[in-house]
Amino acid sequence: MSPIDRISADLEALTAIRRDFHAHPELGFEEVRTSGIVADKLASWGIEVHREIGRTGVVGVLKGRGTSPRRIGLRADMDALPIEEATNLPYRSTVPGKMHACGHDGHTTMLLGAAKYLAETRDFDGTAVFIFQPAEEGLGGARAMLADGLFSRFPCDEVYGLHNNPSGRTGELSVRPGPAMAAADFFDIRIVGRGAHGAQPNRGIDPVVVQAALVQALQTIVSRNADPLQSAVLSITQVHAGAAYNVIPEEAHLAGTVRTFDDDIRALIAKRMREIAAGVAATFGAEITVEINDIFSVLRNSEAQTRAAAAVATELFGAAKVDTAPEPKMGSEDFADMLHAVPGAYAWLGGKAGANLHNAAFDFDDAIIPLGAAYFARLVETRSAAAAG
């Protein structure tokens, strides 16, 4: 029986687990209930369990039947998003303002499905390491697990991650070598002027005017400073100022994100942001401070592990359902930090078309749970052998 067929026999139970996670979403580093269920399930299947890795993370360790020293890591994320769900699903979120709008409930369930299958079959030589990560959505869950000794306590020769893709073909796996997802910086800019009566702007330094000029000027960095052959994005996503109709405020704030694939371009954009802010501040007589935070690294898939991922997907889904040359994504993923420590590959698995990721109407496609679980499991079976290269 193929892994897909065997895991599909458990689809009803796995779907119930996934929908329970969906109904009880938890934000980053708050995944106490979720991680507790994960740990209990792993333990019930005879898997060695380690809790509170990176605060709310869980690691399961399962040895195969052989004597190979190879250890294969499989990673899923567990956190939800601060979004009010806009569906009428029977398993919709029961927590106001929180929702699994990215499918992490499905990713967790896929990895649980793989763990159960591997615990039952033990048809592999080395060791499987199941990594259930907290706080992927910009809060640094991968870095927290790494700082807590993830790969020193649980060494892995390779590590693999997977994400659902509601805009891809159902059952199609896409994976590319090299840079596959962008680095991300989040920035906050504080503008301090001088407050005044709205009828007497000459007595103040209007931070709103400074803010408007700065927004326009920052947009020239990508168009006029960055190499046009290098992909880059600078987006202003928050603008805050004022609280009354007739008051020029003292301060204004901007916030946003920068996405890049190249470290030199990333450094250039940060440098130009600070230079432009200083110039605009001098022009208007205001004070401007710029804080830029490194949130995500560039996600780079290793060549050998990308080939291995594609080979497993071809075996399971057929060559027509494997894309090895998808376009890089400007979105970011903190699995990148794990790939900086251990070679591996991050892939996308297509599900039914519907609302996109991070949308209040998103719903994970439960039909792909056996596909993702089988993909994870087969990676362990094929890559843990002593001769794996």
Image (spheres, rainbow, N blue to C red):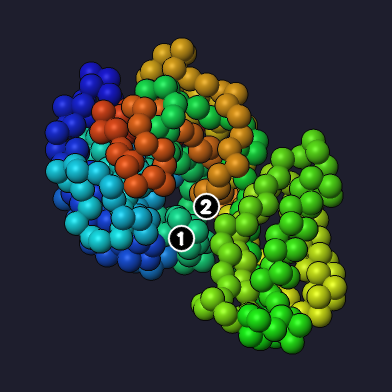
Q: Name the residue under label 2.
A: 334
**What x and y, as percent, mark residue 266?**
74, 53
**What x and y, as percent, mark residue 20?**
18, 49
Count the labels in the image.
2
Of residue 300 and residue 294, the one placed in the foreground of this image is 294
Q: Distance between the residues labelled 1 and 2?
A: 8 Å
Question: Is disc 2 placed on a helix, strand or loop?
Answer: loop
Residue beneath the point at 79% across and 52% down: 221
Dot 2: few (<14), some (14–19), or many (≥20) neighbours within 10 Å?
A: many
User: Is 155 situated above or below 271?
Assistant: above
**What x and y, as percent, mark residue 234?**
68, 52
The reply, left or right, for residue 359 in relation to residue 24 is right
**What x and y, as percent, mark residue 376?**
37, 34
Residue situated furthest front in the rendering: 199
User: Is 275 situated above or below 198?
Assistant: above
Q: Name the residue under label 1.
A: 141
- Whether residue 255 is visible, yes or no, is yes
Location of the C terminus (image quadrant): top right
Residue type at numbered disc 1 = Gly
Dot 1: few (<14), some (14–19), or many (≥20) neighbours within 10 Å?
A: many
The reply, left or right, for residue 95 in relation to residue 299 is left
Residue type at numbered disc 2 = Asp
* Residue 217 placement: quadrant: bottom right
Residue beneath the point at 39% across and 50% down: 77
Question: Is disc 1 placed on a helix, strand or loop?
Answer: helix
Marks 1/2 in contact by CB < 8 Å: the verdict is yes
* Residue 196 placement: quadrant: bottom right
User: Is 310 situated above or below 235?
Assistant: above
The reply, left or right, for residue 120 in relation to residue 361 is left
Residue beneath the point at 42% across and 59% down: 135
